Amino acid sequence: MAENGPGAQPMAENGLIHRRSRYGAGETMTRLQDAVKTKGLTVFAAIDHAAGAAAAGLPMRPTVVLIFGNARGGTPLMQLNQTIGIDLPLKALVWEDANGAAWLSYNDPRWLAARHGLGAEGKAPTDTIAALLDGLAESVTSSAGSG
């Protein structure tokens, strides 16, 4: 996986956007949770896959999924096609690669809209969500602040 340099666009593959963090995985997750709450979004759950693996006696680098969102953002998309509910609320994955670098990965909302065939009606709400996620990701992974 190639790195994002200063000012570089995030990488996308198969509908996923990856941003390398300047911080460790733990601090990146804390910054993400703080930024999500600052934006007025609800944190529904944090799933710590590494803790689950450890409980099963299996090694795993830090890997945590944060599930968050709000009804005002997601409902308009589900009104167009309820199947997008399988991909909502929003999710972000903070993980550490084999070299110790922390990453923030999330689904590209435009990819999700295409996946669920939302068409032109879904463009404005999808663009709004994409801008929100991109802003959150930038603030969480860079030194610019946390929200």
Image: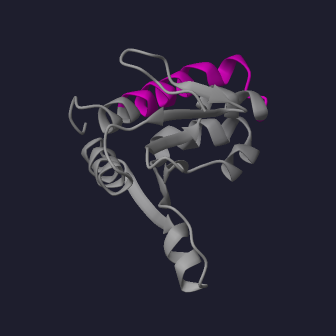
Colour approach in the figure: one colour
Question: Where does residue 41 sit, x and y in percent of width and height?
Answer: 36, 48
Q: Residue at x 30, y 33 (%)?
A: 139
Relative to 126, is 70 on the left or the right?
left
Count the labels in the image. 0
Relative to 112, is 42 on the left or the right?
left
Residue pushed farthest front?
Answer: 99
Question: Where does residue 122 sit, x and y in percent of width and height?
Answer: 64, 25
Q: Is residue 109 above or below residue 102?
A: above
Q: Residue at x 24, y 39 (%)?
A: 146
Please tell me in which quadrant of the rendered image residue 75 appears: top right
Question: Where does residue 94 sit, x and y in percent of width and height?
Answer: 47, 51
Q: Is residue 63 above or below residue 39?
A: below
Q: Is residue 44 above or below residue 136?
A: below
Q: Which quadrant: the N terminus?
A: top right
Q: Residue at x 49, y 68 (%)?
A: 48
Q: Is residue 74 above or below residue 56?
A: above
Question: Where does residue 50 sit, x and y in percent of width and height?
Answer: 52, 69
User: Main SS of the magenta segment?
Assistant: helix
- Taking depth in this image into account, of 82 and 54 the one nearest to the observer is 54
Please tell me in which quadrant of the rendered image residue 111 appears: top right
Which segment is the magenta one? 116-135
